[in-house]
Amino acid sequence: MASVFETASLFRIFNSSKDINMSKNIIIVGAGVAGINAATKLVDNNYKGNITIIDMGKDPHKRLPSEVMTGMLGAGGWSDGKLTYHTAIGGQLKKYCGEDKAMELMNQVITNFKRFHPKPEEVQCSNPDAEPDFIKPYFGLRLFPVWHVGTDYLLEIAKNWYSYLVDNGVEFMWETKVTGIDFETGEIILKD
C-alpha cells in the first residue's frame, strides 16, 4: 500500500508542482467533491506517482440515488445539484489559504463540474442581490451565490468524471472504510 501523502505537500501541488517529489504514491480518503477534485488536479498536472482513492460508498455505476452520503462525489456533489459558492459557508478553507486562494479553488471546482457536465451551458449561478428585498429582512437571511448544476445531470457528471480519472490511472477502492492512519509508518487501516 502507498504511504500517506502529507496534507501540506498536497496543498503545494495546488500552488506549484515544482517543489515536490512528483512520483510519491498518494492515497486520498473519500471520493467526495474535495477528494475527486484533488485527484483531478494531480492528473491534470501529469502527476507520475500512483493515486488511489478509498471510499466507503460505491462507484457511480452502482450507486443508488438514495445513497447520498458516500460514494463518487459524496454528499456535496450528489444530493441536489447545487454548489454553495462562498467561503462564509461550510468549512474553514479561507483560514488555511486566505480568501482569494479559497475562492480560486472554489472556481476550480465549478470549472470541473462544468467540464464533466453533458450540457455545461446549463450550469448557472444565482445572484443573491437579485432576490426580492422583502425576502431578506423578513427571514433575517444572508444570501450567497449558488451554482445550479442540475440534479438530473449528477449521475452523468459522476460517470464522466470517474471515467476520466480511471482512464488516467487513478485507482479506486470502493466499499472500503478507512478506520485509522498511522502517520509515522504510513500504514492505513482498512475495513471492508
Image: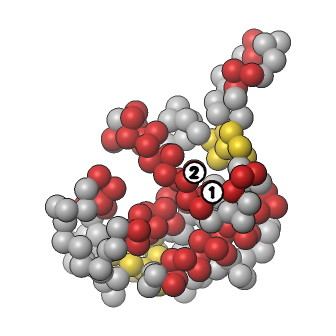
- From the top left corner, tell me how far across and down residue 11 is, in percent: 31, 55
Secondary element under disc 2, as helix, strand or loop, is: helix
Q: Residue at x 79, y 57 (%)?
A: 151
Q: Residue at x 66, y 22 (%)?
A: 142
Q: Nearer the viewer, residue 174 or 43?
A: 43
In which quadrant is the N terminus drawn?
bottom left
Q: Is residue 72 left or right of residue 26?
A: right
Q: Residue at x 72, y 65 (%)?
A: 118
Q: Mark 1 is on which residue type?
A: Lys
- From the top left corner, tell me how far across and down residue 88 is, in percent: 52, 32
Q: Which residue is mark 2?
A: 110
Question: Which image quarter: residue 49?
Answer: bottom left
Q: CA distance from mark 2 to mark 1?
A: 6 Å
In which quadrant is the C terminus drawn?
bottom right
Q: Which residue is mark 1?
A: 114
- From the top left corner, tell me how far across and down residue 50 is, in percent: 34, 82
Q: Is residue 80 above or below residue 92?
A: below
Q: Mark 1: few, some, or many residues within 10 Å (few <14, many ≥20)?
A: some
Q: Nearer the viewer, residue 10 or 3?
A: 10
Q: Is residue 82 above or below residue 27?
A: above
Using the image, tell me which numbered label, if any, was put on residue 92: none
